[in-house]
Image (tube, rainbow, N blue to C red):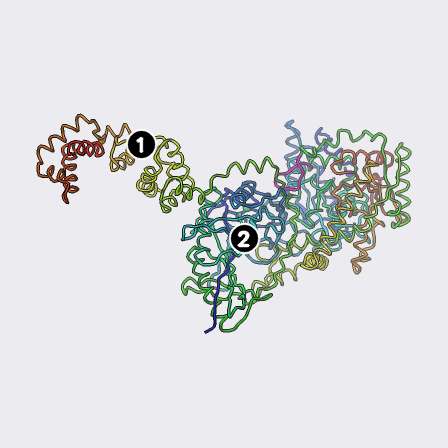
Amino acid sequence: MADLQYKIIVGLEIHVQLRTKSKMFCSCALEFGAEPNSRVCPVCLGMPGSLPVMNKQAFEYSVLAGLALNCNIPMFTKWDRKSYYYPDLPKNYQISQYDLPLSEKGFIEIPLESGETKRIRIIRAHLEEDAGKNVHSASSYSQVDLNRTGTPLLEIVTEPDMNSGAEVRALAVELQRLVRFIGVSEADMQKGHMRFEPNINMKIIRNGKEYRTPIAEVKNLNSFRALERSVTYEAQRQLSEFLETGIEFGMGNKTTRGWDDEKEMTVLQREKEEAHDYRYFPDPDLVPVELTQEWLDEIKSRLCELPLKKQLRYVQEYNLSDYDAGVLTADRATADFFDEVVNAGGDPKRVCNLLTQTGLKITKEKNCNITDLPVTPKGMADLAKMVDEGTISASSATTIFEAMVQTGKQPDVLASELNLVQKSDAGELESIVDQVIAENSEAVADVISGGKKEKKARGFLMGQVMQKSKGQANPKVVSEILAKKLK
Amino acid sequence: MEELTAKQLRDKIASGQIKSLDAVNDVFSRIEKYEPVIGAYISTFKEQAIEQAEQVDKKVSAGEPLGQLAGVPIAVKDNMCTTFGATTCASKILENFHAPYNATAVEKLIAADAVIIGKTNLDEFAMGSSTENSGLKKTVNPWDTTRVPGGSSGGATASVAARMCSAALGSDTGGSIRQPASFCGVVGLKPTYGRVSRYGLVAYGSSLDQIGPVTQTVEDAALMLNVIAGHDSSDSTSVNETIAPTYDYLEKLNEPVEKLKIAVAPQLNAGADQQVQNTLHEAINIYKNLGAEIIEVKMPHLDYAIAAYYIIATAEASSNLARYDGVHYGHRTQNPKDYVEVYSKSRAEAFGQEVKRRIMLGTYALSSGYYDAYYLKALKVRNLIRSDFTKAFEKCDCVMMPVAPTTAFKIGEKTSDPLQMYLSDIYTIAANLAGIPGISIPCGFDDKDLPIGLQILSPAFTEDKLLRIAKMYEKENNWYDKRPNI
Ligand SMILES: [Zn+2]
C-alpha cells in the first residue's frame, strides 16, 4: 500500500446581483419574474445607435463591497468589452472590467466549525452586466428573454485558499451575509442573486512525491448545497481518476463541468477549455471612472462593523453563545437594533433572549424587520431592565413584548395594565411568608434540618408563597425572606 | 427658392415672406427632377414633411415662437436613428430596420421646427470615402455625374450641392463630412468629439464618430451647430457644459479673428495634387491680405495617422458591428442549420465587401497576441498626433491644409484598390484621432471645374473661432454662389 496524502484546493468565482433599482447601463427596472422582454429598452437590447450610461449606485455598491472585502480600491478604473457571440447577449459583447478592476487584493474571514476563522484572499472584484436568458423550447427553436440583460453583477474572484466543501460553503454563506449586511445585494438564492463557479483540483502526495490533478471548473451553481456537494464530489472523482490514470495538471487540460442535481454528480461539459479569445478592449462608449478622495470617503462612511466581527464580539464581550450571536448578526437590521438596545442600557444576554426567543419569532410571522415593529430600542431596554430588577418575571416579559408589538405602549404601562408587576415590598411579602411558614410546619422542619429533603421543601414553600401572591411575588425577594426566617 | 441659404429661408419663413409649405414643395420638385440622376436619398418623407411644414406655417401665422430651423427642409444621413422610415446605414443587414427612437441630433432638429425631408445615402455603415460602398444605391457627384460625391456622407453633400434640401446632417469618423463636402463644393463641419451627442448615431468607430452639419454656407453651419450642439445625458462621451460651454455660434460670426495666426505644414501638403496645393496657397494668401500671420509647423506623427486610424476604427467597428447577427433584428438567413449559422450566414449574406474587410482587420488587431503590436501601438500614435496638435496650437489659432489630395475621382477608379481609397482620407483623419474640430469650405475649382475644399482645424471646443475664421474667407469670395449644372 502506497503512502498517500491529499488535499483539495478550491478557488471560487462568485457573481452577486446588486440591488439597484435600475440596470447597469440603462434605466430599465430590475424586476424578478416580469413578463419576458417587458423590462427592456434600446440600450439593453443593444439597438443600433444606443449608448450605455453607468449606473452610479451600482458602482458605489461595488466599491462598498470591495471595501468590506478589505480590497484595495484604485482611484482609476475603466470599462472593457468582452466579445463573444451568444443569442442571450444582444451586443455580442459584454461590458465588463478587464485589467483595471474597481477593487483588488482583499480578503474575507470565514467562520470554521471549530469556532476559529480562516482568511480567504480575494484576487479582485469587478462590475459587469449580466446577459439574458435563453429559453429552449421542445421544438426546433429557442427563445430569448432579455429582462435580465444589463443587470449589474459584482464578480468576486478568490485565491484557491479553500480546502474542503465545508469551507467553500462557509465562504458562500458568509459572503451572502456580508453583502446583505452592507445592503448591496438581496442575495436571494431563489432568485439567482448569487451564482458560484468553483475551480477545483487536488494536491496529492504519493510516496513523497507531489502531484496536482487537472483543474475542473463547475459552472453556474446557485445553491449552497450544490456548491458544497459538487466540491466534495469533484475531490473524490479527481482522486480516483488520478489513481487510475495518473494524469496531472498541465496547460490546456482544464475542463468545464456541470452539476447534475438529481444524480448528485458533476458531468463533463467541455473537454479542453477552448483557448477563448475575448478580444478585450476599452469600451469607447464609456468614460473611465476616476474616484476622488471625497467620493471614496463618502462611500467608506457607509461601511459598518461587519457581521462576522460583530458576531465574535458578541461572544467575547457579552458572553452570548456563538449560535445566538450568529442569529443576531444574520441581518443588519437585527444587529443594529440589538446594539441600540444594549446602548440604551439593556443587559446583552437578557436582550438577546428577548430578541431571539420572542422578537424574531414575531418578525418571522409578520415577515418584516425588527425595526418595522412599534418597539423602540429604549422600550426594549426598559423591558430588559424590568426583568433584571425583578419588576416583572422573565415569562411576563414575553407577554409584555407581544403586547408592546400590538399596542406600541411602553413596557411599564403594559406591566401594570396587565397586572404583571411583581410584589417586591418586603413588608407585604413577609406577612405572606409568615403565613406559609405557619401553615407548613413539616416542610419548614425539612428545610431547617438541612437533610436530603431540604431543596424540595424550600421549593415547596416558594411555590406556596407564589400561589398566595397570585404569582406576583418577586421570587428573588421571597427566597431572601425565606432564607432569613429559616436560618 | 434654391438661391436661399438655410438661414435666409428660415428668416423669410419666420417673417411670413415665404411659406414653409412652398419651400418643401419646391425641394420635392427638385428631388423629383434630379434625384433619378444624383441618387442622394435612401428614403424621403414627403407626406410627413408637408404636414410638418403646414404646422410651422400655422405657428407663423399664429405668432407662436419658432425654432431656429423653422420650416427649413433638412436631410439626415441614414446612419442616424429615426422613428419614421427605416434606418438602414446603407446596409442590406438593416434594410428593413425601423428604429424605436430618434437620435438626439434628430430630436433637436425636430425641436427646432426643422422639416425632415429624407435620409441620405452613405458608404455602408459609413465605411468608405466615395459612397460607392453603399449596399443599397449609387450616388453621383452633382458637378460631374461620372464622379463620386466623396464619402461616407456623399448622399448628404450631394443633396445639399443639388439643393435637394437646405442643409443636412452628416457624420464624420475619418473625414466623412469634410471630404465629400469638398468634393461637392459645400461646407462641412466636424465638431469636437463630444460636442454633439452620438446617441442614435449608429456606431462605426465610437471614439472617432461625430455628427456635424453639411451646409451651403459657414453661417448655415453655425446655425445648424447651434441646434445640435450640447451635452446629452444619454451619451457618456458628450461633454458637460460646465467643462466646455456651447455658444450662440451665429452671434459673433461676422467678427474677424484679430491677430489671426495660421499654421501650415508644408511637408504634409506636398503630397496633394498640384492644383489642390495652388488653391490652398491662394486661400492662405487671402488670409494674409486680411492681416493674418502665417507660420510653418512640423507635425511629424501625422504620417502615421492613416495606419493608426485603420487599426482603431476597424477594431471598434469589429465590436460595434457584432450585434448585427440576425438574432434580434435585421437580416436573417433562411433555414439555418443551427444558431452558429444564423450568425455566419446572416452576416455573410448581408454585409458588403468593405464592411467585411474592416471587421476582419479590426478583429485581427484585437486578437490576443496582436493587441499590443497593433491596437496598443495605434493608441500611442494617436496620443502623439494629439500632442502634435497641442504643440502647434500653442503657436497658432488654427492649422490649414487640404481636405483631400485630389478633387472628386471617377466612379470605380479606386474601388479595386482599397489602400488607394484609404489614402484619400490622409488630411482628414488626424482631426478625428485628435478629437478636434475641422471644417471644409469651398475654395475654388480645378481645371475640370470640380470643387476644391480648404480645411481649417482648431483646438477642441473652439468651433466659435473656427467658424469665424472660415467666415473671414467666405466673405472674400463668392464660391458658394456657383452651382453645379446637373
Ligand atoms: Zn434597458
Magenta segment = B229-240
Q: Position of residue B377 (x, y in %)?
A: 74, 53
Please tell me which residue is depicted at 37% across the width and 38% down the height of the picture: A370
Task: Name the foreground residue: A5 vs A409.
Answer: A5
Residue A360 in the figure: left or right of residue B28:
left
Q: Is residue B218 magenta?
A: no
Left or right of A216, for residue A327? left
> From what the image shows, is residue A448 above or below residue B32?
above
Q: Is residue B38 visible?
A: yes
The residue sitting at 83% across, 53% down in the picture is B409
Chief secondary structure of the magenta portion: loop
Residue highlighted by disc 2 = A157
Q: Which residue is mark 1?
A: A385
Residue A51 vs residue A434: left or right?
A: right
Q: Chain of mark 2?
A: A
Residue type, label 2: Val
Residue A28 x/y as whole percent: 53, 44
Q: Which image quadrant for residue B95?
A: bottom right
Across and down, in percent, residue B25 comes to 70, 40
